[in-house]
Amino acid sequence: MSAKTDVKNYTGFRTLTFVCLFILYAPLVVVTIYSFNASPSITVWEGFSLRWYGDVFTGPESGKFKAAAINSFSIALIAATLATIIATSAATAIVRGGIFKTRTLSLGLISLPLMVPEIVLAVATLIFFNAVGFTRGYMTILVAHIAFCIPFAYLPIQARMQGIEDTYEQAAMDLYATKAQAFRRVLLPLMMPGIISGFLLAFIVSLDDFIITNFVKGAGVETLPTAIFGSVKQGLKPNIMAISTMLLALSIVMVTLSYVVSKTDNTK
Amino acid sequence: MAGGAATGGSAAADTYKSARHWLLLPSWLVLVLVVLAPVCMMLIYSFLTKEFRGGVIWEPTLAAYDQFFFDRGLFGDDPPKIEWTYITIFWRSIWQAGLATILSLIIGFPTAYFIATRPERTRALWVFLVTIPYWVNLLIRTVSMKFLLRDQGPMNDFLISTGLIDDPLRIVNTNLAVQLGLFYSYLPFMVLPIYASVERYNFAMSEAAADLYATKWTTLRRIVLPAVKPGVIAGCILVFVPSLGAFLAPDLLGGAKNFMIGSLIEEQFKGNAGNWPFGAAAAMVLLTMVLILLMIFARQQRRAEASP
Amino acid sequence: MTENTQIAVDVRDAIKRYGDFTALHRISLGIRDNEFFTLLGPSGCGKTTLLRMIAGFEDVTEGAIFLYGEEIEDLPPHQRPVNTVFQNYALFPHMSVLENVSFGLEMRGASKADARTRAGEMLELVQLTQFASRKPSQLSGGQQQRVALARALAPSPKVLLLDEPLSALDLKLRKAMQIELKHIQRETGITFIFVTHDQEEALTMSDRIAVMSAGEMQQLGDPRDIYETPRNMFVADFIGDTNLLDVSVEGIAAGRATCKLSGGHRLTCDAVDGVNAGAKVHLSVRPERLFLSDQPTAAESLQGTVVENIFIGTDISTIVDVPGGQHFTVRTSNSDRGNKRILDPGTTAYVNMEPGAARLLVD
């Protein structure tokens, strides 16, 4: 289509899109490159090296990072699993439970963690644990993570379930399946891409959280983001860039996975 | 269309109607206990007396809000004057978040429009490209931004080596750095809702406008923009709200002079001079502002849906 | 019909309400064992609602449904020995064709091996044996339709419910499936309850038809009854083409009613219960039961002017204006014999009626 007859496209919009993508990716790319820097200074480039990756695993701070990584991954795994189960159950009620009074209210409640600013949520959770007398530590982080992961797990699951016609379950029940069998044999397999996608997003969100974790963690219990923050506060060091690059790669892999899974259409 | 659908029989699927309350129970339990109850508790704490090393004494008082709005001198017995310190911090937060929102709109709108006008099969990929950075740890993104913008960072090195500038641009620890950081943190939130609106826009309307002698830019202003306004408003809210309460960007990129609400609140709980009731009160003020914004937004969206 | 014909599905005073809206107004209906029964009506008439009530997907607000003498309206769908062929088939996309067809048998407790064997037989019946391991999405629309049929028939239901199963197929395939369905019904001897909005399909396939509109049953009868002696305006208009005339009944004598048209013409037709002298009612005359002539004939005839001849393949449709603002559509078979009676537009013509062609309608 020539520019003359094209009323849709605007000159400059393409350029701005590339500017946008450049801004989004430039910092990440730069940090990734510098994480392979041989120099102990972050300012000077001295050639390619994997030295700082080694430092993350064996250097003076490796013990701290290892403990933080174990905390981060175990919390993300447990929180994402529980949040996904809770979200699947809630989505079934909201998408397949007809119209009922507490439906809108439930939807509002589920999206609450998305609407309340994170810092407010962090303050509220801290105050709550304090008021009920919980000692801050691993468990308090886990409980907070389960709660704010729910909406992230919920959204793809709900979207998926809305795309599945209820005639499938009806057909199953017409063919003598009970409601539970119709759920397990028909609805659940069809929903699987949404559930996996929801789980992966919840996992990333939990792994990435800094603000809430920073508030509810006890002294001595660190996750990767709080450990990184603590280090950054004392100045940018190359090992931080290496660990950041690893986390960055992990996030991208998981989001890509989630994207690919959610695009697979097992109803076709 | 089958008779059942036309009569509303299957308007809402209700296969699991009988179990719905049990199915909702776990989510209610967790969210009420860990989100809703804590927010109410926070409200209560904001009316309690502070304990000096963090925590509260259960004696009701308005001291936290009084401290927020009024200055009663060093010993608390001067006639009350308006306390500007905290109002200034809030005002600066609104200003910073607002500028970040405008910046996001300037870059985000053309991006969203461009993506929405791509052929259908490549569109999802473009959207994916824009969303990936959002899923990368916010802390890592902010640290990366700081690394890039530093006085001796790669950006300044590059600009000096090309001879464009002689002395490094001092960006870190300025308001501009905070705005850039916020913009960078929440840009995908601007692009996605606008993209969704433009994708639904019927481009035959642009052709109709061109047919009726409108220039391209007039068409954009008079036809496209009004049609995608709900998406633009949604995008602005989604960038503005989290920017308002942001902690990492102002803390890492702004330095001590560019304090925002997030840091003010954090200091009350994490710092040594902790004042929990005051922190709770500041959080309440922030929450109230956000909820008012969201309510206005919800009303706007309902109105937009009501009119065809 | 013999004395001992069994009733398969007995719907008694069934009412369906959604809040303030009444979807079905007190329907009573007896569907016989072994018959091909059709629920016919425009969309929103309640036919699908009634079918779904029999299947168990809709509550019955008031009234009862019996299946071979057993009251079933409170049973959940999986406890009713009826199966459904859904409008869009609802084949389970994550299962193979064979798994789809054996699903119902497995749910009824058959062993996996038995279920597969029986499912294989069903696939043979619908000639899809070679597609057993395919996924539904790899089949054409017509093949999917047959899988849906095999799946619903596999557990040997007492009654098979079909919800507009042919509506997604193109015309040719639809015609072929109509005949195949009818054959399968005869072969299996299962009672079929078929829902459609297509009157031609209903006339072609059914033993009996229930015409429905606005949640009420308008007429119940065999296809010929419904077509030739429609009970009311809705049925006459919905089934086939017809000429509807506004008339006032002048008098009734010896089982014949004399009717006056708005233009002053008079016609006689069989009297009908519920229509008395002085009533303003409608008269229905099928276009193929009228014939044209250039001279008055011995039959009842009305003088008018030819407006237009429309060629429609098998027939020629002629529109004739008669005084008083009434149009008639006359259908003449497109044969040598028929063509001789075609008159040019503008010429005077007489519209003649076969005896018994006009039917009085109770509104």
Image (cartoon, coloured by chain):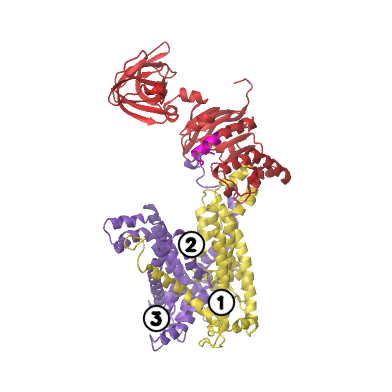
Per the image, the residue denoted by label 2 is B124
Q: Position of residue C213 (x, y in %)?
A: 46, 32
Q: Position of residue C176 (x, y in %)?
A: 54, 35
Q: Is residue C154 visible?
A: no
Q: Position of residue B210 (x, y in %)?
A: 29, 58
Q: In the rendering, what colour is chain C?
A: red
Indicate yes or no whether the magenta region holds residue C171. yes
Q: Nearer the viewer, residue C343 or C16?
A: C343
Q: What chain is tagged by disc 2?
A: B
Query: Which amino acid type is marked by label 2?
Result: Ala
Q: Residues within 10 Å of mark 2 (few under 14, many from 20)?
A: some
Query: Which amino acid type is marked by label 1?
Result: Thr
Q: Position of residue B303 (x, y in %)?
A: 38, 55
B113 lies above or below C283: below
Q: Which residues are drawn in magenta?
A: C164-178
At mark 2, the secondary structure is helix
Per the image, the residue denoted by label 3 is B78
